[in-house]
Image: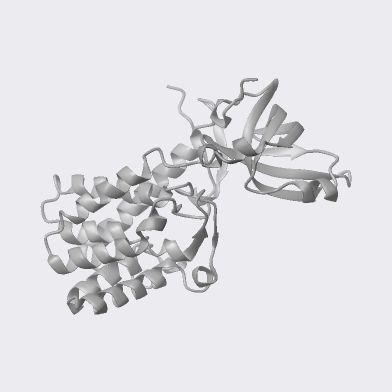
């Protein structure tokens, strides 16, 4: 039987899908009956699903991060598609062995992205900056190949952290064509290291499914990143000025205190880092939200975009 990818689902009719069970909750409906609220993913996206008249035994039998064969009706609830599940069954082991093919992943191969990132390190002329960036990247290299950039929200996909960095560094390079006063050594360095401590803030498996670590919850990647720069800089004998400038870029890239930044940017490249980071996150959230929304329709409120309902232009 031909299976349907999540991004090809259409309202009405029944479908057969092969999806990874990402989340499950046992809830009580208004009629006091229990139902299961599920979240499924495949390589193309994410969708919620419901099993009505459920029970604790069924809830306990479902295993997260496993592939299931799904037979369901496709309905729409509050402008979003959802699956009304008729039957679901754990896929056989030969399918489970290919699970990496069924999870949301960056559209570029991680090995290629990593090579490109190292090519940008080679463009940094200042040896102190280049060496500390290289050391920080090498310390995280293996995990960078599969780590997401977040547990949820932007780039929360396998290899999402690399994808976020690649898009940012390409934007940074183009800015020099317009603003000749930019110090590309600093801007490249800031882009390349600003989120590296998310490897540690998050604990991720090789599928890109992650949760916050204890250190991540208590400190966060800004504090952890500042510490990593200090340690690497001391080991390399990096100049105090370079250490301080890079630490300030990490500290200020969230811009506002309520988002974790103790200081706003105080030099141009730190300012640009924030806006490149914000722009890439916003573009990702727009694209990710609207890809399953019909043209001429609005999305549900998007938490990361101030709960705005996004519109998909009908042109």
Q: Position of residue 313 (x, y in %)?
A: 45, 28
Q: Position of residue 82 (x, y in %)?
A: 67, 34
Q: Residue at x 38, y 57 (%)?
A: 142
- Indicate whether 233 appears above or below 311: below
Position of the C terminus by quadrant: top left
Q: Nearer the viewer, residue 118 or 157?
A: 118
Q: Please give left or right for residue 261 compared with residue 86 in the image.
A: left
Q: Please give left or right for residue 239 compared with residue 295 in the image.
A: left
Q: Position of residue 16 (x, y in %)?
A: 67, 26
Q: Nearer the viewer, residue 257 or 106?
A: 106
Q: Which corner quadrant of the image does residue 13 belong to?
A: top right
- Indicate whether 283 appears above or below 292: below
Q: Please give left or right for residue 161 compared with residue 210 in the image.
A: left
Q: How many marks?
A: 0
Q: Please give left or right for residue 75 compared with residue 192 in the image.
A: right
Q: Nearer the viewer, residue 109 or 278?
A: 109
């Amino acid at each position: 039987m031909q299976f349907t990818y999540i991004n090809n689902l259409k309202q009405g009719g029944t479908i057969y899908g092969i999806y990874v069970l990402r989340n499950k909750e046992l809830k009580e409906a208004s009629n006091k009956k229990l139902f299961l609220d599920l979240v499924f993913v495949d390589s193309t996206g994410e969708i919620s699903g419901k099993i009505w008249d459920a029970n604790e035994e069924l809830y306990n039998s479902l295993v997260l991060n496993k592939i299931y064969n799904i037979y369901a009706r496709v309905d729409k609830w509050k402008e979003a598609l959802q699956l009304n599940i008729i039957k679901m069954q754990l896929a056989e082991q030969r399918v489970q062995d290919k699970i990496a093919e069924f999870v949301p992943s960056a559209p570029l191969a991680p090995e290629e992205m990593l090579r490109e990132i190292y090519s940008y390190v080679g463009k940094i002329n200042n040896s102190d900056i280049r060496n500390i960036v290289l050391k920080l990247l090498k310390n995280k290299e293996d995990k960078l190949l599969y780590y997401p950039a977040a547990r949820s929200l932007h780039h929360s996909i396998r290899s999402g952290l690399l994808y976020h960095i690649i898009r940012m560094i390409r934007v940074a390079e183009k800015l020099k064509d317009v603003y000749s006063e930019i110090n590309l050594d600093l801007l490249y360095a800031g882009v390349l290291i600003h989120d590296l401590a998310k490897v540690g803030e998050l604990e991720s498996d090789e599928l890109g499914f992650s949760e916050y670590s204890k250190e991540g919850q208590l400190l966060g990647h800004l504090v952890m990143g500042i510490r990593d720069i200090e340690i690497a800089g001391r080991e390399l004998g990096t100049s105090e000025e370079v250490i301080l400038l890079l630490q300030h870029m990490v500290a200020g890239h969230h811009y506002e205190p309520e988002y974790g930044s103790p200081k706003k940017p105080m030099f141009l490249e730190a300012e640009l880092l924030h806006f490149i980071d914000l722009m890439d996150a916003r573009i990702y959230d727009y694209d990710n939200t609207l890809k399953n929304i019909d043209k001429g329709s609005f999305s549900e409120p998007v938490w990361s975009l101030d709960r705005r309902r996004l519109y998909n232009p009908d042109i």
